Amino acid sequence: MSTVVDRPGKIVEDWTVWEYDSVTSTNLVAAELPAWSAVRAETQTAGRGRFQRKWVSDRGGLWLSAVVPTPSPNGRILPLLAGVAVCDVLYGLGVRHLRLRWPNDVMVLDRKLAGVLIDQFRPGLAVIGIGLNIDNQPACYDATLENHIERLADIRPAPIPIENLITVLLRRIRSLVQPLTAGDWTPLLSRVNDLWSKGRRVELDLDGDIRGGWFAGVDDAGRLLLQDDVGASTAYDPEKVRHLTEMPEYHE
Ligand code: BTN
C-alpha cells in the first residue's frame, strides 16, 4: 500500500478526496479513512476484483474507492446501490445499452465497462471500490479480457475530465446512501431490478453446486431470484452465490 499522499486531500463537495499516483489497491488505502473520504489512484499494482481476482488497473482508467457509513446491518443493499450509482452517472454521460449483471458488473451489451468491489474493514463503514475502463488497455495486460471488456473512450469519443467524473460519481453515491440510513430500500430495489437483463438464462455457482434457471432480479430482502421453466421462483442469499454465469443468448 502506498504511504505517500501525492497531493493533500482535497474537498470535493461533501467529500475529501485523496489522490495518488500508484497504490496497491485504493480500497486498502481507504480502509483507514473516515466516512465520506475517497481515494483515487492513476494505477494500482495489486488491484482487487471480486472473489480474490486480480483487477488490471493500468493508467487511463478510473480506480476509485469511497468510504460510506453502512446503511443497514444487512450488507446486501450496498453492492446493488453501487452498481446503480455507476449506471446513473454513465447514463447521464450519454452511454447507452447499459445494464447490470448481478450483482454489480456494469455492462454495455455483453462487455464489462466497470466493476465494483465492496469491502467492510471496520464496523459501520464500508468501502465502495469502483473500477471503470476509460482509455486504459486492460487486454494488453491480460489477453483473456480481449472482447470481454468495454472502454468509455470507445463508446463515447469526447473525453470526459476524470475530475468531473469523480465529482458526479461521489455526488450520486452520497445521494443514494443517505436515504438508506432511514432503512427504505424499496425505491432502490425497483431501480436495480430495472437495470438487470431479467429473463436471461443463467447458472448460479453455490460453491460448487450449480443451479440453472432464468434470472428474475432480487426480492424485497435483496435475495437473488431464479425461475425454473414453469415460472416458479427460488430465492438465494447473495452470500451463498459464488458466481453467476450468463448463458449465451441464441437468436434465430
Ligand atoms: C470486480 O468486478 O471484480 C470488481 C472490481 C473492482 C475494482 C476496483 S478498482 C478500485 C478499487 N480498488 C481495488 O483494488 N478494487 C476496486
Image (cartoon, rainbow, N blue to C red):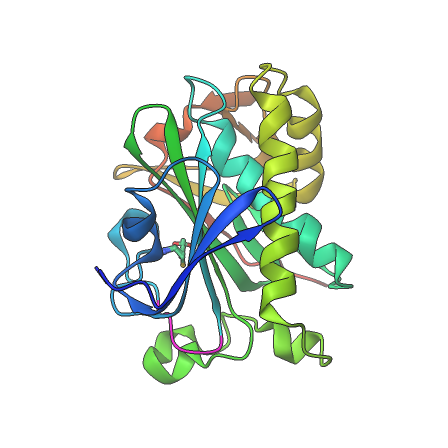
146 left or right of 166 in image: left
In the displayed image of the protein, which residue is found farthest to the front? 8
Q: Is residue 182 visible?
A: yes
Residue 90 occupies quadrant = bottom right
Give the x, y percent position of residue 36: 48, 39
Q: Quadrant of residue 151?
A: bottom right
The magenta stretch spans residue 1 = no
User: 174 above or below 110?
Assistant: above
Tell me where residue 15 appears, x and y as whole percent.
Answer: 53, 45
Quick one: 106 or 235, which is closer to the camera? 106
Left or right: where 20 falls relative to 195 = left
- Residue at 63% across, 78% down: 153
Return the residue nearer the eye: 183 or 101. Answer: 183
Can the viewer see residue 200? Answer: no
Whereabouts is ligand 1, in terms of quadrant? bottom left
Q: Residue at x 65, y 63 (%)?
A: 164
Magenta span covers which residues? 56-60
Q: Quadrant of the C terminus?
A: bottom right
Q: Residue at x 48, y 77 (%)?
A: 60
